[in-house]
Amino acid sequence: MRNDCSELKGLEEIYNYEDALAMAVFLNAFIRHADIVKMANLAQLVNGIAPIFTNKDGLFLQTIYFPIAEYAKQRNNLSLDLFVQSPTYNLENRPPVPCLDVSATYHPQLRTVFLNVLNRSQKLDIRTQIDNVEGQIAPEADLWQMYHTDLKATHTFGDDQRVRPVTRKIKLDVSRNGLSFVFPKHSLTILRLTVK
């Protein structure tokens, strides 16, 4: 396999880690506005402006592939209405923007909440108090997280392991039906919480 994208030409787009985080902004917005957005799709899935690139020797997964694939596991879930307070940052001529971009879905048969949290801050890990108003949060959860030190990191043929999510089971310190969690700077975290 080639270790570069020199054969690419035309409409091809190489996405970096920053683009994967931007994809989470879009997906969170779709979930938050699920009462209006009934369907959203990606125009290209392979080559071109796509999350998967192929050539005659193989393929590589672009950074945006991973949030798309993970959020797809929440299809048909119920969108939850959240109250979020977060540190903010300023952009020219705009109101302050929250550092934490959050959405959540609920799977009633599994009694599972998917909490999708993008920390947009370039410098701050943000400790957050997460409170639940109905049911009891189980003390174990599944964590899916994307983090990379280089916002411009990309993948290519033969080298698509640089920006990959980590998954693991985690123990939660649940008290008063809430928990505290630290979301790393410029990261995307999906917590899969069971509610009893």
Image (spheres, helix red, strand yellow):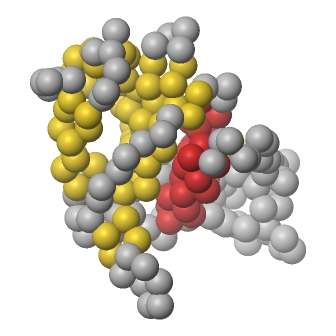
Q: Is residue 134 depicted above or below 22 in this figure? A: above
Q: Is residue 104 depicted above or below 54 in this figure? A: above
The foreground one among 108 and 156 is 108
Q: Position of residue 120 (x, y in %)?
A: 39, 63
Is residue 116 visible in the rendered image? The answer is no
Looking at the rendering, which quadrant does residue 101 occupy? bottom left
Is residue 143 visible in the rendered image? The answer is yes
Q: Position of residue 148 (x, y in %)?
A: 38, 57
Q: Residue at x 78, y 62 (%)?
A: 49
Q: Position of residue 165 (x, y in %)?
A: 45, 41
Q: Residue at x 84, y 71 (%)?
A: 11
What is the quadrant of the C terminus in the image?
Answer: top left
Q: Is residue 122 depicted above or below 164 in this figure? A: below
Looking at the rendering, which quadrant does residue 167 occupy? top left
- Residue 73 shown left or right of residue 104 in the figure: right
Q: Residue at x 76, y 55 (%)?
A: 50
The foreground one among 150 and 108 is 108
Instruction: Give the residue at the far bottom of this rendering.
Output: 93
- Residue 20 shown left or right of residue 126 in the figure: right
The foreground one among 23 and 111 is 111
Q: Residue at x 33, y 75 (%)?
A: 89
> What is the tally of numbered marks visible in this picture?
0
The foreground one among 149 and 23 is 23
- Residue 72 shown left or right of residue 39 in the figure: left
Q: Is residue 95 depicted above or below 181 in this figure? A: below
Q: Position of residue 56 (x, y in %)?
A: 85, 48
- Residue 103 shown left or right of residue 135 in the figure: right
